[in-house]
Amino acid sequence: MPTVGVNRDKLFEKLGKVYTDEEFDHLCFEYGIELDDVTSEKEMLRKELASTVAKGGDSKLAAEAAAASEEVIYKIDIPANRYDMLCVEGIARALNIFRGTQSSPRYHLADMTGKQVLQMVVKPETALVRPFVVCAVLRGIKFDPARYNSFIDLQDKLHQNLCRQRTLVAIGTHDLSTIQGPFTYEALPPGEIKFVPLKQTREFNSKELMQFYLENDQKLKKFVPIIHSSVVYPVLYDANRVVLSLPPIINGAHSAITLNTQDVFIECTATDLTKAKVVLNTVVTMFAEYASTPFTVEPVEVVDALGNRTLYPDLSYRSLTLTTDYVNSLLGLQLPGEEIVKLLTKMQLAADLGPDGKELLVQVPPTRSDILHACDVAEDVAIAHGYNNIPKRIPATTTQGRELPLNQLTELLRAEIAMSGFTEVLTWALVSHAENFEFMRRPDDGITAVEIGNPATADFEVCRTSLLSSALKTLAANKDNALPIKLFEVSDAIVLDPSKSVGARNERRLVAVFCAKESGFEVIHGLLNRVMEVLGVPFKEDPATAGSPVTYHWSPSADPAMFPGRQAAIFTGDTQVGVFGIVHPEVLAAFEVPYPVSALELNLEPFVFNQFYESLLEPLST
């Protein structure tokens, strides 16, 4: 949870009431936030000074501590997804609406009829490094030192939290009176970008600037690796080729905002467009209360590399539909519809009852990006009602905690295989498309693998449908170890299944590989027999097992990942549960494994049964 430090007196001024520490702590508890500490700037510097001296550092902070303010600071813990409460403006607004002393504001885009809309043109080269940008303008802002500091602090908090240390989104704010549109967002070679950065007096090219920050700036050096290795750096220019910023590192000194700034141009460059829009909405909605027309934001037209035109910010209200019965069933209450509407109003959510008195139509403002599902609305009802006001009752059902039979079997089997001389590995459930199909010589039929919609890396494109590819990848990473190498893993493969509510299911499997100068097929064959022995599953053709309800056997198979004629499918009854054999040389070459490998892959779920051979599988959902 992020911690926000706010000046107590400024906060009370916005709340219109003076609280004792205990009273304010109680108010925070009611809203679901927490007053973590009551301190002052001087006290915080004293603690930092004591820590520095204790570690053998110098005491340069002594002068700062002596001159620091003694005004009381409240350090408030905010839920990680409440980005609208990362500044004093957001905290005060939320608490005032909660207490009923202020109505929820309505956020608007400025009417630009007959006016020229500022434009940001995105060049195609930005796709190589940081492809997205969104912008907005706040007109007629009235800054004082407290508001200015809050404006900067909000950007820092967002950079640390939602922006993931600027890797996903970087915020730039500029004095609009010093620059001129239309603006361009470009990506150029480092040596071609020259400007005077913020807090500097001389001009740098961006390559020199990166080195300067690495050597001299403890704060900014941690952001340099984000773009340092890129062949082009992102940069924003105005119509006169004045550099606005070099995202995600630093803004230009030319357009720096000051206490005298009235019109603020805000740009957010990003690798994630959704998060960029959330960040922009948060910044403009929090400080639009200081605009000449409160809660009104001037839009900016962004023209992307394909020529598509979009106005930002998007301050539209989202709609969610749910029922009072759904809310009451989650909370264990019998709240009437009118009461639920009133409680949602306290949480900045406008709601209307349907004609039947049961349906709820909820309007979600652009500040509440944390509301994603109907259950989030029910949670806000619970907060506004008060968790302490929900009556305690004994659950109508009793449960007994115990290990799932599948997990119990898995743990026992791991120990047995380890005692057979194999080393356990643990690998990722996500693999590349090539590793799952092309490397394994298996075709992609389009109905087997769960694909990642927007993979962050080419290494994680699909959920694995077989554990064998992961085991071979591990072998390749350890091919310089002494032979033989004997590895195993008991984990889940993921396959598409339309019968499941989520469209896919996990399947617990065992994979084992033996790598040596010879294939070692007999070792893998022996492991299969040992596994079946400890599972209590006899071989079908053993005369002593006549009449056994569960047996196993093998028959020739044609798995393309295995060598023809040196493989077999494993069956229990008429159901194939696995395969074992010598891995095909083309598969080994694809994974860069230089020695022969024999492998076994087995689905364990059919063998989760009791002494009467009755299945003990307990699916969590259908």
Image (spheres, helix red, strand yellow):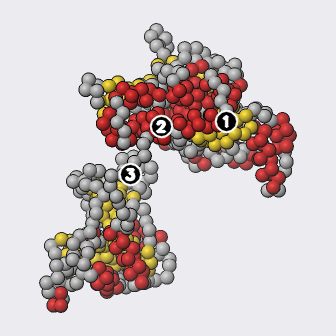
Query: Is 60 displayed left or right of 435 in the figure?
Result: right
Residue drawn at (28%, 63%) of the image: 618
* Quarter residue 318 falls in: top left
* Quarter residue 525 falls in: bottom left
Q: Residues within 10 Å of mark 1 (few under 14, many from 20)?
A: some
Question: Dot 2 lies on which element?
Answer: loop
- Identify residue type, mark 1: Asp
Residue drawn at (44%, 32%) of the image: 305
Give the number of the mark in front: 1 or 3.
Answer: 3
Disc 1 from disc 3: Cα separation: 35 Å
Residue drawn at (60%, 32%) of the image: 87
Quadrant in the picture for the N terminus: top right
Task: Establish if 434 lies above or below 42.
Answer: below
Looking at the picture, tell me which residue is in the foreground, 170 or 589.
Answer: 170
Residue 394 marker: 3
Disc 1 from disc 2: Cα separation: 20 Å
Query: Is 194 displayed left or right of 400 in the figure?
Result: right
